[in-house]
């Protein structure tokens, strides 16, 4: 499959011909005629959620960091280093591996917006690193010295690299699921670890920064879940039993990797985050992600740490970050129940 043309004056595609991928767009983005209304709603939400890393006060974190216990400091550094990797990867992946094959202009627009937000998260991590470290390279280069971190990074990058070559219809669909997994599972052990520090009254600026980042990640998750569901309506023949088995295998691998990572960074030293609780939490999230794209659940477990939901929410909105159901998700006055 070829990448779409960015300017295609010979296109005869009309509104009803538009497809998530495999279409023939002329290259124009026309927000007055959006086939995928969820994309327009999501754009408005993302725009309303605009924020900047320097809005978050980190002065107290610089003081708190010096008094973290060795396990807390180790956890903070490892989580921050891993988050840096994932948002760096995703900034480029969206523009290089995903957007060139998506042929609905309104979806191209929100993927571009997402790529900006991923880069903004990288700026956020820079603010955090600069606040707490005299040698920023120690955290940025931690993947080179920590074998477990390198293992996780290599696995995630390998999935994307395998899906990027010899593109066909099935690989594009699998890439959608890979992005759903990245946005919906791979960040969450790290987020919970940061919130555990905040819940204990430490590193409150960092916890607030992660809240802003997670709020963005929920819209990114919704983007790919809606993209999968729209593609399923247009191309049901692609969603075979074989595909479902591959997707489930991807989810099981992701759950094992993220649960193992969460256990590694907390090391049994962080109150309220045992390895069993972390695994059940990731399994719970996986079930919610599978349900969101029309598949039966895999694990059938309850949410083991509901305090994370409450802690991650902003006071001026009613949002369940982990179900992905957004009721009032903007800084502004936008209200809608579904995308």
Image: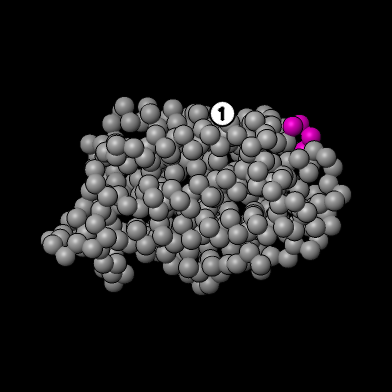
Q: Quadrant of the C terminus?
A: bottom left
Q: Picture quarter containing residue 176?
A: top left
Is 65 drawn above or below residue 303 in the view shown? Answer: below
Crowd around label 1: few <14 · some 14–19 · many ≥20 (10 Å): some
Residue at position x 21%, y 52% in the image = 23
Residue at position x 39%, y 50% in the image = 96
Residue 301 seen from this side: no
Residue 5 locus on image (x, y percent):
24, 57
Q: Main secondary structure of the magenta part?
A: loop
Residue 44 locus on image (x, y percent):
43, 67
Looking at this rendering, what residue extends furthest in the right direction?
Answer: 67
Residue 9 locus on image (x, y percent):
16, 65
Residue 50 seen from this side: yes
Q: Nearer the viewer, residue 282 or 323?
A: 282
Q: Nearer the viewer, residue 318 or 57?
A: 57
Q: Quadrant of the N terminus?
A: top left
Residue at position x 26%, y 38% in the image = 168
Q: Picture quarter containing residue 273?
A: top right
| Tally of numbered tags | 1
Q: Is residue 88 left or right of residue 170?
A: right
Kind of element beneath mark 1: helix
Query: Is residue 312 rendered magenta in the image?
Result: no
What segment is highlighted magenta in the picture?
267-271
**Circle 1 sits on which residue?**
256
Q: Is residue 197 left or right of residue 47?
A: right
Q: Picture quarter containing residue 121?
A: bottom right
Q: Is residue 229 left or right of residue 65?
A: left
Residue 181 locus on image (x, y percent):
48, 40
Is 101 drawn above or below residue 159 in the view shown? Answer: below
Is 48 drawn above or below residue 23 in the view shown? Answer: below
Residue at position x 68%, y 60% in the image = 127
């Amino acid at each position: 499959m070829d990448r779409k043309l960015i300017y295609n004056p010979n296109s005869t595609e009309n509104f009803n011909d538009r497809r998530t991928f495999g279409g023939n767009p002329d290259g124009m983005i026309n927000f007055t005629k959006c086939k995928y209304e969820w994309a327009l709603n999501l754009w408005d939400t993302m725009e309303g959620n605009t924020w900047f890393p320097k809005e978050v006060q980190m002065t107290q974190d610089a003081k708190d960091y010096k008094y973290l216990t060795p396990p807390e400091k180790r956890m903070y550094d490892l989580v921050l280093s891993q988050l840096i990797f994932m948002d760096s990867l995703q900034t480029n992946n969206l523009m290089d591996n995903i957007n060139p094959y998506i042929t609905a202009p309104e979806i191209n627009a929100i993927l571009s917006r997402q790529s900006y937000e991923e880069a903004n998260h990288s700026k956020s991590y820079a603010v955090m690193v600069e606040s707490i470290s005299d040698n920023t390279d120690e955290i940025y280069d931690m993947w080179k010295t920590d074998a477990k971190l390198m293992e996780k990074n290599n696995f995630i990058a390998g999935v994307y690299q395998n899906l990027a070559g010899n593109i066909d219809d099935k690989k594009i669909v699998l890439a959608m699921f890979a992005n759903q997994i990245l946005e919906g599972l791979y960040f969450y052990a790290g987020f919970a670890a940061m919130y555990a520090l905040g819940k204990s009254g430490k590193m409150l600026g960092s916890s607030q920064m992660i809240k802003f980042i997670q709020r963005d990640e929920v819209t990114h998750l919704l983007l790919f879940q809606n993209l999968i569901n729209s593609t399923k309506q247009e191309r049901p023949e692609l969603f075979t039993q074989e595909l479902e088995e591959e997707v489930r295998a991807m989810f099981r691998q992701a759950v094992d990797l993220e649960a193992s990572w969460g256990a590694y960074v907390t090391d049994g030293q962080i109150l309220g985050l045992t390895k069993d609780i972390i695994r059940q939490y990731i399994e719970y999230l996986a079930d919610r992600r599978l349900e969101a794209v029309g598949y039966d659940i895999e694990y059938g477990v309850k949410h083991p740490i509901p305090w994370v939901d409450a802690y991650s929410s902003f006071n001026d909105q009613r949002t369940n970050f982990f179900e992905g159901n957004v009721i009032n998700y903007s800084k502004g006055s936008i209200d809608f129940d579904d995308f």
